[in-house]
Amino acid sequence: MDAETIVREFCESAAGRDVEAMLAFFTDDAVYHNIPIEPVTGKEAIAATLGQFLGPATKNCEFEILAISSSGGTVLTERVDRFTIGDRKIELPVMGAFEVSAEGKITAWRDYFDMQQFISQSA
């Protein structure tokens, strides 16, 4: 399976809000940098970070890919990430960069977004 397909499937898996299922896409030593937050390394740390977003999502979660481009194992996504937390709907424009190993696992994931947009929508 090519890197772009893996990233598409990973993004689709967000809808299930199942952190363990999402972790299956990563290597054990993967790095997740949810910019502007400090990067985390390893599945346990990635699970904790994902849990901060997916745990409170009470009704839905969606990583909608607007555009995607890949070169070898690097995949770039333009997305809108949507969450419903209680009665608040959050829509966050995100640029993501994924590095996928030859074995088909994500080794690095960097998301670039405006934290103030997230805070203002979730407050």
Image (tube, rainbow, N blue to C red):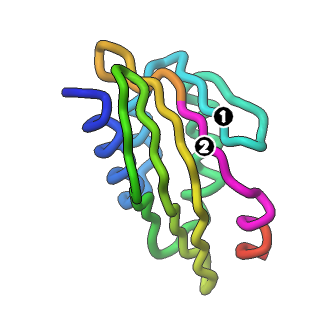
- Residue at image point 36% right, 58% down: 16
Q: Residues within 10 Å of mark 2 (few under 14, many from 20)?
A: some
Q: Secondary structure at mark 1?
A: strand
x and y percent of residue 105 in the render? 36, 23
Relative to 77, 54 lies left or right = right
- Residue at image point 53% right, 22% down: 30
Q: Which residues are magenta?
A: 109-118
Residue under circle 2?
111
Which quarter of the figure has residue 106?
top left
Placement of the N terminus among the 4 image quadrants: top left
x and y percent of residue 32 in the render? 60, 32
Residue under circle 1?
33
N-terminal label among 2 and 1:
1
x and y percent of residue 68 in the render? 38, 46
User: Does the magenta portion include 17?
Assistant: no
Foreground residue among 3 and 89: 3
> Would you say residue 54 is visible in this rendering?
yes
- Location of residue 117 with respect to 71 vertically, above or below: below
- Mark number, residue 63: none
User: Does the magenta portion include 111?
Assistant: yes
